[in-house]
Image (tube, grey):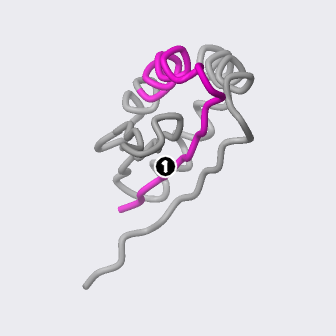
Amino acid sequence: MIISIGRLVFKPGMEAKGLETVFENSALGAEQKGCLEATVLQNLDNPAEVLLISKWQDQVSYSNAITNLKRDPKARRLFLKVLPQLEKQPTYASYKILPT
């Protein structure tokens, strides 16, 4: 299983508008084959900071989804739409869940 985490920090006053775009983009990711869950988290102490968490069936599903989304005109438009609303570039990382 793969967990993807994206971190975005909005410019002051851009939180509401930015979250609308993030929810649209998150819904596109959730529709991808192999996506088990997609969640948007907002920092309680700093509402300008959000995390995008997605859980994937496996590395292949995750990689395929990233490729598909990069080719999807709507996903590209949403990504480009959110960039000017951010204080800095978003960061993304993916992790595998280790057996315990």
Q: From this view, report whether residue 93 is shown above or below residue 17.
A: below
Quarter of the picture holding the C terminus: bottom left
Q: Position of residue 75 (x, y in %)?
A: 60, 22
Q: Amino acid at mark 1?
A: Tyr
Q: Which residue is mark 1?
A: 62
Quarter of the picture holding the N terminus: bottom left
Q: Nearer the viewer, residue 100 or 67?
A: 100
Image-based side of 99 in relation to 21, left or right: left
Residue depicted at x 74% and y 22%:
84
Residue depicted at x 44% and y 29%:
26
* Mark 1 surroundings within 10 Å by alpha-carbon count, few (fewer than 14), some (14 through 19), many (20 or more): many
Magenta stretch in the rendered image:
1-26
Image-based side of 57 in relation to 67, left or right: left
Residue depicted at x 59% and y 20%:
14
Q: Residue furthest bottom?
A: 100
Q: Position of residue 78 (x, y in %)?
A: 61, 18
Q: Position of residue 56 (x, y in %)?
A: 38, 51
